[in-house]
Amino acid sequence: MIAFEEVYSWLNKYGASHLRSSSSSLIGHLKTSLQAGHLTEAAGLLQQLRDHACKLRDDAEVTEVLLECAEAAGRLGNLDEAGAILSDAVSRAWSDLHRRAVIQWLLGAVQWRSMPARQQAVIFWRNSLSDFDRLARQPSTPREQRTWYENTYRLLEQSLIEALEEIGKYIDMVQATGTTESAFAPQPEQTSETPLPLAPGLLHISDTSISVESDATHTADILQLFTVSEEIPAGDFGPSGNDPFPIGTVELDRLSINGRPYSIHSTRGRRLINLPLEKIAVVKVKGDSMNLENITEQDFVMLRRADVPENGDIVLAEIVGVDNKATLKRYFKEKDTITLKPNSSNPVHKPFVFKKINEGFYVRGVVVAVLKPI
């Protein structure tokens, strides 16, 4: 596994530090306390540094300060705090692809130290890999940097594969022994909870992601199709590539053509093949507004982008002033009237009537399939 410190050093590899003297001074004091083992003093300085970050106006500087805070929190054993700080840093650096790639890998490294969070760690690592791949492909990237990004991608990809194999070994042990006792080397932050499977194999659905089950004899590569989201943010299609916090990815290592199964193998020497389908999204169902359509909270829906749906389509719609996080309704248009109808056993859900599309509501996608747990 690649060390946290090694990846941390990549943050400003192709750019100058944005830290000013006041931030650098506080960071220096914090590091000195940690090195001396003065943990109580270090905890106090960490809080001072976090308070200092709240007063800064330059997001680039805030990002660097937050990373120092996260590293200190991790060294103090506060993994939840470190993860929360890094999540904030990802948001701050979202428009900077290089920094975003580095910070998401660091966030995954923190999550990996906690057994229940290992599934989320793999998600962040895959997001980071996708960003490094994009950096390597950008035409404007200088050749030397492109080479570094390509080499870094391969290095991190191998680390991710090792992580997946470790999870796979754990799953194999659980299946063989029937126990959920941890098969990993014990750490103070770990628990005996069983992580959800993430190794390649047959497609299945879990509570927090769509992933694939382990198959120790299968050697195919992994095709990543699109991300899975908790919800579609207001004003966007979200999971088509703009969702900053996806909860998983749809992946498979085999498919069927005319009923005949085929395995998937990369032509680029990579185990992970990223093939985003820009007009497709998978979103977790919330609420019971369509439960009489057999769409419940345990399901996911697959959507295609469509601004103007066809009559009778089930749509994911954002209703202005009512539900700005999007809701499932059936779309009906009759003459000059558009109705968004629920189909629910819960009487609290009522139809919404509008005069025209994009006036009072916005269609974020049309449901093309419901994914139900087996």
Image (cartoon, rainbow, N blue to C red):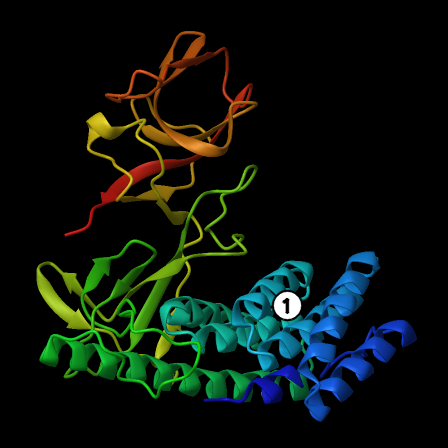
Can residue 133 be seen here? The reply is no
Percent coordinates x, y for residue 279 in the rendering: 42, 48
Furthest toward the bottom, the residue is: 36
In front here: 40 or 171? 40
Q: Secondary structure at mark 1?
A: helix
Badge 1 crowding class, 10 Å Cα cut-off, few under 14, some 14 to 19, many 20 or more, is some
The image quarter containing residue 204 is bottom left
Residue at 32% over, 37% down = 367
Left or right, 215 with reference to 9:
left
Percent coordinates x, y for residue 337 in the rendering: 43, 9
Q: Which residue corresponds to mark 1?
A: 97
The image quarter containing residue 122 is bottom left
Residue at 56% over, 72% down = 78
Residue at 34% over, 88% down = 185
Please give the count of numbered marks on the rendered protein.
1
Query: Mark 1: which amino acid?
Result: Leu
Percent coordinates x, y for residue 188 in the rendering: 43, 81
Percent coordinates x, y for residue 219 in the rendering: 21, 83
Furthest toward the right, the residue is: 21
In front here: 185 or 211? 185
The image quarter containing residue 82 is bottom right
Q: Which quadrant holds the N terminus? A: bottom left
In front here: 242 or 277? 242
Left or right, 125 with reference to 193:
right
Left or right, 339 with reference to 293:
right
Residue at 41% over, 68% down = 117
Can residue 63 be seen here? The reply is yes
